[in-house]
Amino acid sequence: MSQQINGAIGYVEYAYALENHLAYTKMINAAGKTLEPTMDTFSAAAANANFTNVKDFYLILTNQPGEQSWPITAATYMLMRTDYPAEQNQAVLKFLDWCLKNGQQQATALDYVPMPPPVVAQIEASWTESFKSPNGEPLWTASLR
């Protein structure tokens, strides 16, 4: 719409803006620094986010600390049912592990920021706690990689 109405302001994801050659602006972040939207400033926001004390990794990444953190950043989530059959959830967890370990370069190629390694470790640790077999054993262990 902002391409059609003179002076309009819209918000779209970075990949969409690049793909469609849209104009974008610099912004002032929580540290008072003026930044451009770049993969580095998005990465800084993700790296400075503290996922340790939030339920299910639900964290709004707006105004994360750090001089290089882009002020409007978001994470993409995957929701899984813990009541699905164990073998189905285990297959999904193996696929997600592959994505987190091997799909990071593809994310970058599509103008998305890879998850920082400490966050990947937290995610996989949560899988061990959240997904259990019928006998109560964790569905996810490092040996399943």
Image: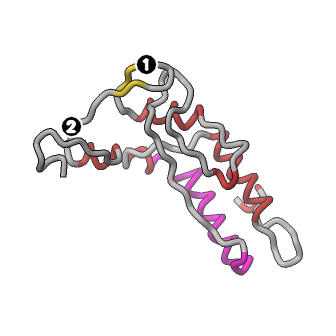
In the displayed structure, does residue 23 sit left or right of residue 103? left
When asked about the image quadrant of residue 42, the answer is top left
Residue 69 tag number: none
x and y percentages locating residue 141 in the rendered image: 78, 59
- Residue range of the region highlighted in magenta in the rendering: 83-106
Q: Indicate whether 136 appears above or below 34.
A: below
- Label 1: how many Cα within 10 Å (few below 14, some 14–19, many 20+): some
Residue occupying the point 82% across, 65% down: 138
Of label 1 and label 2, which has the lower sequence position?
2
In the displayed structure, does residue 87 sit left or right of residue 46? right
Residue occupying the point 36% across, 33% down: 37
Tell me the amino acid under the disc marked 2: Ala
When asked about the image quadrant of residue 48, the answer is top right
Residue 33 tag number: 1
x and y percentages locating residue 81 in the rendered image: 66, 72
x and y percentages locating residue 50 in the rendered image: 65, 37
- Magenta stretch encompasses residue 11: no
